[in-house]
Amino acid sequence: MKKDNKLAVLVDGDNIPSKYISEMMEEITKYGTPTIKRIYGDWTKPHLARWKSILLEHAINPVQQYSYTTGKNATDSAMIIDAMDVLYSGQVDGFCLVSSDSDFTRLAMRLREAGTTVIGIGEKKTPDPFIVACDKFIYLEILHKENGSATDKGTKGRPNVDKITPKVIRLLKQSVNDSADEDGWAFLGDVGSMILKKQPNFDSRNFGFEKLTPLFKSTNQFEIEEKDQGGGRFKLIYVRNKR
């Protein structure tokens, strides 16, 4: 997404811990401008009290939704209705759905069918159907900065990072092949886009690397080439499977 795109950020307050809010909002700005920011919940309930002190800081509009019956999630329904209203208003270019609840799977699919980009944000417990229904899915755990942050050289300071398994290597190699020219070289930006189409929750930070390039280098399975562009002001990264 372009950084000047307008985004609607809709947060399931019943489902997302308040400790993630700062990192989450910072992450969202990488994909566009959050022009609509709403969080849904029954604010009469004690477990949402922690949210109240930080909503003003981040200019998030709390939407009150009472639980009219036991066992029914009124918050989900209110968030879904609002999302469709925003979609038809034409005010935004994309949505950030913040929840770990699979109940939003159909909503994500419907928003994408309408031609808008959907970024999902939630915890690692999020069910796969909701993850794959999004264009991109970001785990909150990799945004929450506890005990320092990971470096490009490894995973020091970042607990519970995922291992680079043979399955991950196959995904990387196949994505390079799918994006490559006749000589086998592929622009890394195109490779990253191809990976997300296949696996929306893929993120180099899941493995302890801030960027995709050091992740590829760490596997020792690829050739990496940097090409100067713009008079040496920046470089384009190309990758090829080792033969």
Image: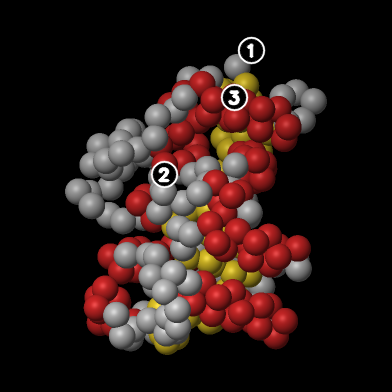
Residue occupying the point 33% across, 33% down: 153
Q: Which mark is residue 170?
A: 3
Q: Residues within 10 Å of mark 1 (few under 14, many from 20)?
A: few
Q: Residues within 10 Å of mark 2 (few under 14, many from 20)?
A: many
First along the sequence among labels 3 and 1: 3
First along the sequence among labels 1 and 2: 2
- Looking at the picture, the colour scheme in use is secondary structure
Residue occupying the point 28% across, 42% down: 158
- The image position of residue 234, as x and y in percent, is 55, 48
Residue at mark 1:
243
Task: Name the residue at the top extreme.
Answer: 243
Q: Amino acid at mark 3?
A: Arg
Q: Which mark is residue 151?
A: none
In this rendered view, identify the residue nearer to me: 111 or 94. Answer: 111
- Which quadrant of the rendered structure holds the C terminus? top right
- Tell me if residue 236 can be seen: no
In this rendered view, identify the residue nearer to me: 123 or 15. Answer: 15
Are circles 1 and 2 on residues that touch, CB within 8 Å?
no
- Tell me if residue 16 can be seen: yes
Q: Which mark is residue 205?
A: 2
| Disc 2, SS | helix
Q: Amino acid at mark 1?
A: Arg
Up the image or down, 184 lies above or below 127; here it is: above
Distance (Cα) linking label 1 and label 2: 27 Å
| Disc 3, SS | helix
In this image, 104 relative to 71: left or right? Answer: right
- The image position of residue 54, as x and y in percent, is 29, 79
In this image, 26 relative to 83: left or right? Answer: left
